[in-house]
Image (cartoon, rainbow, N blue to C red):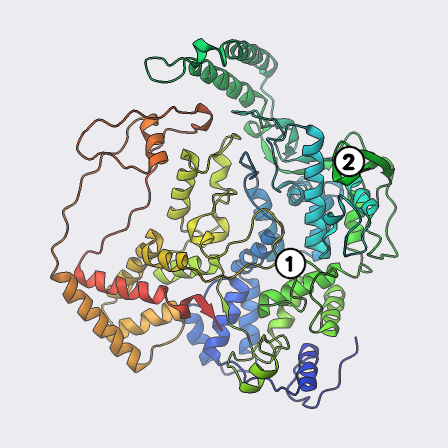
Amino acid sequence: PSLPEIRNPSWAQGAIDRHVLAKLEAKGLSPAKDADGVALIRRVTFDLSGLPPTTETIDSFLADTSPSAYESLVDRLLNSPAYGERWGRHWLDVARYGESTGSSRNVPFPHAWRYRDYVIDAFQNDKPYDQFIREQVAGDLLPADSPEKRDEQSIATGFLALGVKDVNQRFKVRFVMDNVDEQIDTVSRSVLGLTASCARCHDHKFDPIPQKDYYALAGIFRSTDLCAGVRNKMGGGGLDYYDTSMLLILGGEAKEDPDAAAKIEKATAAYEAAKKDFEAIRGTPDGLALGPNGRPRQQPFRQKMIRAQAELMALTDPATRGKVGLGVRDAKAVADTEIRIRGEAERLGPVVPRGFLGVVPVADAPPIPKDQSGRLELARWLTSPQNPLTPRVLANRVWKHLFGAGIVQTVDNFGTTGDTPSHPELLDHLASQFVRDGWSVKRLVRSVVLSRAYRLGAEETPAGLALDPSNRLVWRHSPRRLTAEEIRDATLLAAGTLDTRRPESSPAKELKVIEIRNNGPEAAKFGTIARASRHRSVYLPLLRGLTPTSLEVFDFAEQGMVTGSRDATTVATQVLYLLNDPLVKNQSLALAERLVQKSDLDDAGRVNLAYRLTLGRSPSPQEVVRARLFVDEYELAVGSVEPAPEVAETEPTSKEDALAVADTGATGTGNGAARPPAPPVNPDEIVAAEVIVKERVAQPSSPRAAAWSSFCQALLGSAEFRYVK
């Protein structure tokens, strides 16, 4: 689009500013004053890295009076490893990333972390967005100049494999078609901002997407093997849901044991015999009768069958012999598919040729070969420079993450039921410039944060509130609450305990592919792992339905669907978390100890450092006085209270005791009394004999440490800590 005429050209510093100012002038509004240096560096550092600026970075930036100081800061942030982790997490929201199937039977994806790392690296290395999309839709079909590149592109197709799956579905055809629908919904909403899956049962009620176009896409995904390592089975147990044939072999062929065939034959015979014995006693009066241990007599038979199944699986599992991943590949049987009447998988209508959505006109759309799935052609259609939606949707997502709201506020829905753009010409400008710049996300982000519109202050004006209370026209910068990850990571950074290194793989890698109960031992174990981790939040284990508390309480992304915009609620559980959670209390104490150990500072200096580490600014004289009075009074009050006697705790020593602790939340009787009989143990859910211990709250070493810890917790629980302006 051509640049609009504006009355105050001296204010604008580029095309973005001209488009913003033109809308403001048409409404009779003036932009707010520019943000001050402290607010600006905190804003841009959080936006680009997901972390607060260090005190050293703030001091250096404020002392640099050169015209290029801000631009240099932006470039450093864009090149830092934290950028890839921050912006990779944005895409993981869109890609509905999770490390288990979710749904009625929650089964882990032990290798999903490879896709997570692929996404982070792609943003860090500024992989062109069109290539990024092509690799996720058809990476296995793209040329590769090395085995490493081939593996990378195969891992990228995990985008299509990691959705929610109902492995407890009885009928194979329904399982397949539900997964196809999930893939269509993910691709159409994430890349095109269209709700194409609404046409599964009938022509789309609101957007011009006919049912035949939906099944044109469905034919592409029906001709694709979904290699998520799981299969459907009604009422399965143990490893019944694990399908080792549906894994991607990476790094060449898996290494074979010379005696593999004989071992597999022996293990197969043992499993079949154990299965036969169990099925013979299963459900019989003798099998259901209780033995001396209070458990059904059939249980040892079931345990023997499951052990034999696990031994057989270990011999046939490619993950034990080499590197594997989750993703997709072209199926052996490639064909068009039928329309499903009313969306019901078994009710077949006419066959529809594989193809794309007619509502999105792309002149150079490639034809689909008869002997291939069509995913490669779909990927090229999605990323054609002539596709009118793909670059606009991404540009809008970038604007949303930097301004708090998209130019189109419904970032995942550009259809008729979605929002209309506040600045359509600006969106066109951003999208066209994005394509001209080689689909570089970093260059797009850089151009936006260098605009004067982004650098506006957050102060309200009476005219702005009267004429544009929701700030759709960007007359100021809208404050935003930090995301769940930012709150946790900033807490750890302030305390000096954040580990910025990337961990190897994920704790989920060690899980067997068996059902995970939300109240079972695996769930308790992973809660403990998440609480103990000091890595960045993007690396926490993310089993569906078992979101770490520190993320869940602050509106973490919905892991079952495309989430381009998270909710931002204010609820009582957030306050309770900030008051009582062991992570908050322990990090408050760590920050307090960091302050107390500064022997070169007096109490006023410690208050100043606490404010700078948590809020990025120095306190006012009144705040210093209040803080010192609080610490002194707290120390005096705590010092006059007798400490409560410690109660000895007996830790469970057996696997059954550990499971009982996990299920009941008990930590032992503490007096040697006999524990009540443990409930029947389901061997499907026993993954290890580790004792599960919740993270305990560290105790201050002195009343002085307790006082400073309470003060630090108040800062970490403040609204100013949780919001950025």
Q: Is residue 123 visible?
A: yes
Work out whether residue 542 or residue 104 is closer to the camera in this orientation and state it. 104
Where does the image place residue 274, in percent across and percent down from the top left? 51, 11
Which element carries disc 2, helix, strand or loop? loop
User: How far across and how far down the image is residue 27, in percent?
Assistant: 67, 84
Say which of 483 and 251 sits in front.
Answer: 483
Compared with 521, 695 (above or below) is below
- The kind of residue tagged 1 is Asp
Q: Nearer the viewer, mark 1 or mark 2?
A: 2
Q: Residue at x 57, y 30 (%)?
A: 319
Q: Secondary structure at mark 1?
A: loop
Amino acid carrying mark 2 in the image: Ser
State the mark number for residue 223. Answer: 2
In the depicted structure, whether residue 310 falls above or below residue 72: above
Numbered tag placed on residue 126 in the rendering: 1
Q: How far across and how far down the image is residue 375, in percent?
A: 77, 43
The residue under the point 42% across, 50% down is: 549
| Image quadrant where residue 521 sits | top left
Question: Which residue is at a point 32% across and 71% down the rendered structure image?
Answer: 609
Left or right side of 316 for 356: right
Indicate the position of residue 5 as horizontal and vertical percent values: 75, 86
Q: Is residue 248 left or right of residue 41?
A: right
In the image, 269 versus 189, the foreground residue is: 189
Q: Is residue 132 left or right of residue 38?
A: right
Residue 479, placed above or below residue 65: above
